Every structure is written in C-alpha cells, then in structure tokens.
Amino acid sequence: MVQGFSREPGTEGPLADIPEGGRRRVWRWAVVIALGGFLFGFDTGVVSGALLYIKRDFGLSAFEQGSVVSVLLIGALLGAVAAGRMAENLGRRKALGIEGAVFLIGTAILVAAPGYGALLVGRVVLGLAVGAASATVPVYLSEVSPKEIRGRVLTLNQLMITTGILISYFVNLLFASGGQWRGMFAVGALPALGIVVGALWVLPESPQWLIRHGRRDEARALIVSVAGEERADHLIEQAQRRETQGLRSDSPRAGGWRVLLEPRVRAALIVGLTLAAVQQFGGINTIIYYAPTTIENTGLSASNSILYSVAIGVINLLMTIVAIKLVDRAGRRRLLLGSLASMLVMLALLGLSFVIGMNALLSLLCMVVYIAAFAVGLGPVFWVLIGEIFPPHARAAGSSASTAVNWISNFVVSLVFLPVANVIGQGQTFWVFAAVCAFGLWFVSRYVPETRGRDFEQVDAALQTRFRKRPQVGAEAG
Ligand code: BGC
C-alpha cells in the first residue's frame, strides 16, 4: 500500500514532514515558479484573438496566419530541448529567470513589430521561453516541495496554464473593440516580469541541486528556514545519499542528454515520453484551439464562438481545481485511469454523433465532459509525473525530453487535425483520438506506478518492478 511505503524510515527528500509555516513558504515560491505555466497558457490563447487584427493590419495570407501561430510551437520545442542543460548547469532559479527575460524580449519584439517578418521572430523567441519554462517548472516545483503536498504543488502548474488560457480570452475581449493586438501581447509582460523579479529576489535555489553541486551550506540554510534546525541535518544526509547513489562514477555528467541513456533511467524515460505523446494525441488541443469550428460543425451557431471558448476555459480551470484536491488523496494512477477512460467514452460518442448526425447539444455535452475528464487527470498528472519519476541527476534532462515530445506532438496534431478531418471525416478523427486514449489506458495500468507520498527511491523501485514483470492483479498502488 502507498501508506506503507510513505512511512518507511530514512528515505525522506530534502524537504519532508515540514511544519505549517514552512509549507506556507513553499506555496509562495510555488506560485511564483508556476507563473511559467501561466505564460504557457496565456500564449496558447492570446494569439487567436490577436490574429484577427494582425491579419487585417498586415494583410496576411492564410499560410502567413498559420505560420504566426505555429512557429511558436517550433520555438517551444527548441526551448524545451535546451532547458535541461540550462537548468542543470546554471541551476533551476537562474534558468527560470533567464526564461522570464527571454519572454520579455519576445514580447517587446511582437509589440513593436513593423511587419510579418518581425512577428515571426517575436513568436519564435516567445516560444523558446515558453518551451524552456514548461520543462523547468515541473522540476523546480518538485524539488522545493515536501512529498506530502508535492502532487498539489505540481498541479499548480496546470492550474496556471488553464488560468492563463482563460485570462487570454478576457484580454482578447478587452482589446478587441479597438483592434489593439499589440496591447493583447503586451499583457504577457506582466507575469514574465513577475518571474524575473521572483528569480532575482524571492525564489530559493532547489536544495537538491545545491547539494549535487557541492553547495551544502546553502542547501542547509534553506532547509533550516523551511523545516527547522532539528530536522535539517537528517534531511541533508538523505539528500546527499541520494546524490551519491545517483551519480556513480560511471554515470555521464549530469546536465547532458547522455544521462537519459543510462539503463536505470530507461523506465522513467519511456513513461515520460509516452505520456507526453498520449496527452497531445488524445486530441485535447483540437478542442481548445478549434472549439468554435467544431461546435459549428455540430450544427450550432458559431456566432457566440468566444462564449463557447470561455465556457470551455472555465470548465477546464474548475476541474483542475478538483484535481488539486484529489491528486494527493486519490493518487496519480486513479486520476489518470479515470480520466483516460472517460475521455475514451466521450470521444467515441462524439465521433458517433458526427457520423450518424446526433443532436447537436449532445455533441456539445460530450465535448464538455471530455474537457472536464482531461482537466481532472491527464492534463495535470502528466506534468506532475515528469517532476517525480526521474532520478535527481537526470530530472532536468528527463523533463526536457518529455516536454519536447509534448510540444512536437502538439505541433503535429494542430497541423494535421483539419486536413485529416477533411479526408477521413470529423467523427472518424475523434475515433482515432479515442484509440489513443485506449492505448493510454493500457499503458498506464501496465507501466505507470503510483507516486503519491513516495520518495524517489520508492518511485524508482516501483517503476523497475513494473518494467521487469507483469504487476500482480490488484497491485493498484504499485
Ligand atoms: C497541455 C496543453 C493544453 C492544456 C489545456 C496542458 O496540460 O499540455 O497542450 O493546451 O493542458 O489545459
């Protein structure tokens, strides 16, 4: 049982069992770190509104419009790839600060853009920042949080993503009357500034990273400030032991991609990469990005498209709050399995509704339940797990690789959704997403261990067991 594992003596992380005051500090840091997630969400949503006016001002063709949207995803892919090395070599705090600064530069380029070329450059630079931050945030959040609340702290990332998406719709509405697309982009500078200021003056470095880089005294001071003097030495010793176990003399240098080739990291890597792909190929962004088009295809009027987007954004956000409440109680596996099963059923029905032409309101209902199911499980839990499953020395590289696969899958799905739907039919396309969820369901039940309340050693042991042999029937928590 999970509880049994979490009470095993002598395996706490650098921050564990900390008093209430210490927890409050951790939550304050977490909010600042998760602003990286806000930028992710804000950028996902703001461009659709801005594009309406950019198109008018610069006379962009359909291809040019598409490229303004999608070059961000290419930048994000590159940013995610670069983030692992940066977070390992410079530390989590500096890496996040630099990512905030790059976002500010990208925003400045966009706001001042005189034409199409500058727009593309600005979007790539923004993408670099968003992609890199999306890989750094789960690692950083995981390493500043005690295991008892780690799931909730990591889910804050998804909450900020969904908040960012929703706020971007309101910002679009606010600036729409004057067609001020530059103003829409400029709003993104505020959270980015928050990250830069936070990295300079508010956030601590990750204690696990400090210990790995021989800065034990700084790590100790930080742990004392959160966990108190009595527990500090014990916790430091645990973290130190974890490092010596992780960095055996034959281990490639932490920070490089080669750590991902170590046999010990393989299981975590397969889980991270597979969940990254399943999260996107389950079709979520076809609904987030194309909801108005899809809704129109059901036969409902698209004149209220912004209203539909807002409604979907609100459900997405509310259900993420439910996930925060559940993730440290029900556990990651239960949320993932329930989420994938519900998404599968909704996608199958949604597909059917298009193929046999069911009532439009029923299709809408399927979409809403599908979003809710994603938001309570697959959405947040993917980001939670990539902060939890990798060994400390490979965590930044593992998160980087998983995040890169998430961005590339996002790019592919966004690019091919409409053309594929035109060829095989919209309903049939939803069935393809349903098949991906069925695969995800099998994969999670077979290979993804429960991580709730567990230290890395316990997560690692459970992972290795799952990849070595078939788990016992009923070993749900394993
Ligand atoms: C996904 C994004 C998606 C968002 C929607 C995130 O977990 O990675 O691609 O747009 O959830 O809430």
Image (spheres, helix red, strand yellow):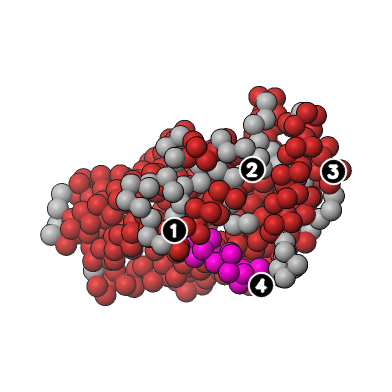
- The circle drawn on residue 218 is 3
- Circle 4/circle 1 CB separation < 8 Å: no
Q: In front: mark 1 or mark 3?
A: 1
**Would you say 416 lies left or right of 250 here?**
left
For the stretch drawn in magenta, what is the main secondary structure? helix
Tell me where residue 16 appears, x and y as whole percent. 66, 36
| Magenta region | 258-272
Residue for badge 4: 258
Q: Is residue 129 above or below residue 168?
A: below
Residue at which label 1 appears: 466
Front residue of 230 and 192? 230
Q: Earlier in the sequence, mark 2 or mark 1?
A: 2
Q: Is residue 224 magenta?
A: no
Give the labeled residue for mark 2.
11
User: What element does badge 4 sit on?
Assistant: helix
User: For the residue marked with disc 2, what is the amino acid?
Assistant: Thr
Determine the CA span between mark 4 and mark 2. Answer: 27 Å
Image coordinates of residue 179 in percent, x first then y, are 54, 51
Upstream in sequence: badge 4 or badge 2: 2
Neighbours of disc 4 within 10 Å: few (<14), some (14-19), many (20+): few
